[in-house]
């Protein structure tokens, strides 16, 4: 018998014993005359259990899903959805979704309509766009008519998307004193400078050069209602892995969110680009699992945010790649040694091969040269608290809980040594070595991007990717050698989970897309994925509260 049934049965089981006691004790124990014992009444059936609150919520959500299913359906963007992975791999974009494709202005001048058609037909749209840019700079109104669709920088073809982000600037589209830029569910403002370029007036890059991402919406007049929906902010709140959109209506999305192995049917309300969870259907056996998965994802996000914080600092500081301006043979890695020596001696500059290099920048920050693996170790160490003291402070480093130089003086500055360190310390890193059949060269772009799309769980924000292969940099007389390179995964697409943004130091630290790597080194492929254990990082990094907004996709100099 359950505890609840015990509570219901107890009064009825005690009544006959009370009656018998009163009869036996008689008037000596009571001032009232004995009463005739009442017949024992059989215990009533306990009331039916009230459904748990989750059941009510699930029932209400199922009804809401039915109502949304009856609302007018919007077409979505099937063509964009089909090309989404290839576009995000090629062009830096805020990965929103659209309830319908934005439309080009049908009343634009005939010249603009013809140029628009030429771009659409061109097998190499970047070459056509390059020819038009001077005209757009003189006639930004023409640029807007040709390029923008309802104010959106929109493309459904990967090569055209790459050309837009790679070549187009705000000065090609506007000459107004101030403009607004809607990126996801956030709106920033920018002002025009004397040279025609724009700089941000607000936002995380205030006072820096304003730039365009794919799917941005821009304008100088009052905006019309948005037709895009930002899901990165919603993921920042719910911590899902990916989402399948089943239906879009004028105010709602029917969606199924994926959390690890769980699929959670949900209703999302949206307005002017911002999405909000309306309800979700979580079966009772999955309630605990969903809470656990969200908790783990939130902890991972805190760790990834701590690493991103230092990546962004290194981008802001524009730390140089460790390669001399004039190189005699192979001298990568030697600048840092000279920098350390000059720094410890209190000097403000040093020379190599006749060129002078600064020890500090104009703000007094250390200008520490990095090879690619230095960017990895520096980021981890900085996130734990360790970094070089600024100008004016005693020479040395601040203390941190991660210190790769301890016991490894200089030996970890090559990628193979760092990979071996990761293998020897499984409590620090999870190491995935790519099977030879999966080492797809970057030049086989569609196949390579398809591989990434098929395995998004292998490449998450904060992961380290190690690539290897021949490069086009060797001179004809030099022996062919396979070179390594390494970088972090910075961000994943909230819709597909695709690893859409990378960050490393190929010259200066930058956030970039896979296409950048594919064009630089088309013969390389992924050899390793190193995932820092978040249990290790939780106890070694300086963690901040989860940022209220998703990680910025642009930081530092243009």
Image: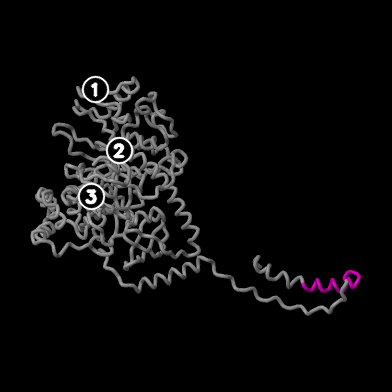
State the residue position of label 3.
Answer: 178
In-front residue for pair 44/94: 94
* Disc marking residue 351: 1
Please tell me whether residue 297 belongs to the stretch shown in magenta.
no
Marks 1 and 3 sit apart, C-alpha to C-alpha, by: 44 Å
Q: Percent from the top left, x then y, of residue 193?
A: 20, 43
Label 3 crowd (10 A; few <14 / some 14-19 / many >=20): some
Hey, which quadrant is residue 227 in on the image?
Answer: bottom left
Marks 3 and 2 sit apart, C-alpha to C-alpha, by: 25 Å
Q: Secondary structure at mark 1?
A: strand
Q: Percent from the top left, x then y, of residue 109?
A: 10, 61
Instruction: Tell which tag, 2 or 1, sits nearer the viewer.
Output: 2
Query: What quarter of the picture does the C terminus occupy?
Result: top left
At 36% from the left edge and 44% from the top edge, which residue is drawn?
462
Q: Secondary structure at mark 3?
A: strand
State which tag comes first along the sequence, 3 or 2. 3
């Amino acid at each position: 018998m359950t505890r609840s049934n015990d509570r219901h049965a107890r009064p009825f089981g005690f009544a006959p014993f009370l009656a018998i006691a009163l009869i036996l004790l008689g008037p000596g124990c009571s001032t009232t005359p004995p009463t005739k014992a009442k017949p024992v009444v059989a215990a009533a059936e306990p009331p039916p259990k009230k459904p748990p609150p989750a059941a009510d919520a699930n029932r209400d959500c199922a009804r809401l899903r039915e109502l949304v299913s009856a609302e007018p359906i919007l077409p979505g963007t099937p063509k964009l959805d089909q090309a989404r992975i290839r576009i995000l791999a090629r062009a830096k974009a805020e990965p929103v979704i659209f309830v319908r494709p934005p439309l080009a202005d049908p009343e634009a001048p005939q010249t603009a309509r013809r140029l628009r058609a030429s771009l659409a037909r061109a097998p190499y749209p970047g070459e056509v766009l390059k020819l038009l840019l001077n005209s757009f700079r003189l006639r930004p109104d023409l640029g807007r008519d040709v390029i923008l669709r309802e104010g959106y920088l929109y493309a459904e073809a990967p090569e055209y998307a790459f050309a837009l982000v790679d070549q187009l600037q705000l000065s090609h589209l506007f000459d107004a004193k101030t403009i607004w830029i809607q990126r996801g569910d956030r709106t920033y403002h920018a002002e025009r400078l004397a040279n025609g370029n724009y700089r941000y007036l607000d936002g995380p890059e205030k006072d820096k050069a304003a730039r365009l991402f794919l799917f941005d919406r821009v304008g100088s007049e009052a905006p019309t209602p948005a037709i895009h929906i930002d899901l990165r902010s919603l993921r920042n709140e719910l911590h899902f892995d990916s989402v399948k959109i089943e239906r879009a209506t004028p105010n709602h999305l029917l969606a199924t969110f994926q959390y690890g192995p769980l699929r959670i049917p949900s209703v999302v309300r949206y307005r002017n680009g911002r999405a909000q969870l309306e309800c979700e259907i979580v079966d009772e056996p999955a309630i605990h699992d969903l809470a656990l998965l969200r908790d783990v994802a939130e902890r991972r996000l805190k760790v990834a945010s701590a690493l991103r914080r230092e990546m962004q600092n290194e981008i802001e500081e524009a730390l140089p790649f460790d390669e001399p301006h004039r190189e005699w043979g192979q001298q990568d890695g030697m600048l840092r040694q000279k920098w350390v020596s000059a720094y410890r001696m209190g000097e403000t500059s040093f020379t190599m091969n006749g060129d002078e290099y600064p020890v500090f920048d104009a703000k007094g920050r250390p200008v520490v040269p990095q090879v690619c693996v230095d960017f990895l170790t520096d980021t981890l160490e900085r996130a734990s608290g360790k970094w070089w003291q600024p100008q004016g402070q005693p020479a040395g480093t601040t203390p941190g809980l991660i210190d790769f130089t301890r016991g490894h003086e200089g030996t970890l500055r090559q990628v193979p040594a760092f990979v071996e360190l990761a293998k020897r310390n499984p409590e620090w890193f999870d190491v995935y070595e790519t099977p030879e059949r999966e080492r797809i060269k970057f030049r086989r772009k569609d196949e390579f991007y398809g591989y990434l799309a098929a395995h998004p769980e292998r490449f998450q924000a904060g992961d380290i990717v190690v690539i290897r292969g021949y490069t086009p940099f060797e001179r004809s007389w030099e022996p062919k050698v396979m070179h390594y390179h390494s970088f972090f995964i910075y961000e994943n697409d909230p819709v597909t989970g695709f690893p859409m943004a990378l960050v490393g130091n190929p010259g200066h630290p930058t956030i970039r897309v896979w296409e950048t790597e594919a064009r630089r080194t088309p013969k390389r492929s992924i050899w390793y994925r190193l995932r820092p254990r978040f249990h290790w990082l939780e106890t070694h990094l300086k963690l901040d509260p989860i940022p209220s907004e998703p990680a910025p996709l642009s930081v530092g100099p243009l």
